[in-house]
Every structure is written in C-alpha cells, then in structure tokens.
C-alpha cells in the first residue's frame, strides 16, 4: 500500500496561539498540489468555528467500486481533550472535503456551545 503524505509543517510562534497542523495522506495514488492547497484552505476555515483545533489528518482514497461516487475522504481533527472523525464519499475529492468540513463545522460549534454552557 502506497501512502503519500504532505504536511504544512506549521510552527507555533506564540505559545498562546495554537496553529492547526494539517497532514494529507493519499492512499495508493499521488495527490496534486492544487488539491492539497484546497484542503489546507478549507481546514483553515474551521478555526473560525473553534479556534483550538490542534491538528487535522485528511485521508484520501479511491474506492474500488463501479459506483461513480468512489472518492472517499476521512478527516480526523484533534482538539484539546477530544477528537472528531468524519467520513464522506462523493464523485470528487473537493466535494467530499467540502461536505466533511461542513459536518466538522457543526460538530465544532456544538462543542464550543457545550463548553460555554459549563462556564
């Protein structure tokens, strides 16, 4: 099994600011830079909903099926004390990333509201 890994290698300059580290893992194919940039940009937008996201692991797979929706995206994000996992399968990786990110946005908003309710 061939897995290509691309990381943004973000550094933390200020200990009070957590910069999200995004790793993209392409299973059995080579991912192009345009798709990686799209994923990075979309993951960066998650910080608008919850600013304490530490890292995101994005797994891209092409499922061996006759179905046209054979592009699978699995995104795992880590926040202090928890992690969220979302899986989507669509016709394109961009669509799957977008749908996954929308699901993660809802999960992060719920988490933020839950934390605020306990303060």
Image (tube, helix red, strand yellow):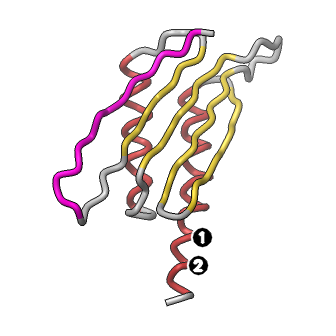
Quarter of the image that includes the N terminus: top right
Residue that badge 1 annotates: 110
Q: Are marks 1 and 2 in contact (CB under 8 Å)?
A: yes
Disc 1, SS: helix
Q: Decide: is 47 above or below 43.
A: below
Q: Decide: is 37 above or below 19.
A: above
Q: For the residue carrying disc 1, how many other residues have a C-alpha within 10 Å: few (<14), some (14-19), or many (20+)?
A: some
Chain part drawn in magenta: 2-15
Extreme left residue here?
A: 13
Q: Decide: is 119 above or below 1.
A: below
Q: Main secondary structure of the magenta part?
A: loop
Queried whether the magenta region covers residue 98, the answer comes back as: no
Q: Nearer the viewer, residue 104 or 58?
A: 58
* Residue 50 in picture, x, y percent from top left: 44, 64
Q: Residue at x 61, y 53 (%)?
A: 84
63 vs 74, left or right, is right
Q: For the residue carrying disc 2, how many other residues have a C-alpha within 10 Å: few (<14), some (14-19), or many (20+)?
A: few
* Residue 110 in picture, x, y percent from top left: 60, 70
* Residue 57 in picture, x, y percent from top left: 51, 37
Extreme right residue here?
A: 66
Queried whether the magenta region covers residue 11, the answer comes back as: yes
Q: Residue at x 36, y 19 (%)?
A: 33
61 vs 18, left or right, is right
Disc 2, SS: helix
Q: Decide: is 70 above or below 111.
A: above
* Residue 51 in picture, x, y percent from top left: 38, 63
Q: Residue at x 63, y 35 (%)?
A: 74
For residue 114, which numbered disc appears in the image?
Answer: 2
Extreme bottom residue here?
A: 119
User: Separation of disc 1 and disc 2 at Cα?
Assistant: 6 Å
9 vs 70, left or right, is left
């Amino acid at each position: 099994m061939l897995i290509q890994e691309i990381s943004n290698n973000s550094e933390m300059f200020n200990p009070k600011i957590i910069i999200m580290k995004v790793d993209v893992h392409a299973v059995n194919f080579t991912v192009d830079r345009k798709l990686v940039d799209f994923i990075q940009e979309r993951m960066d937008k998650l910080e608008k909903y919850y600013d304490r996201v530490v890292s995101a692991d994005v797994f891209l797979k092409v499922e061996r099926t006759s179905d046209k929706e054979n592009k699978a995206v699995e995104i795992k994000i880590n926040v202090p004390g928890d992690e969220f996992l979302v899986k989507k399968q669509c016709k394109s990786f961009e669509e799957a990333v977008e749908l996954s990110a929308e699901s993660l946005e809802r999960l992060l908003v719920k988490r933020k509201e839950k934390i605020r309710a306990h303060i």
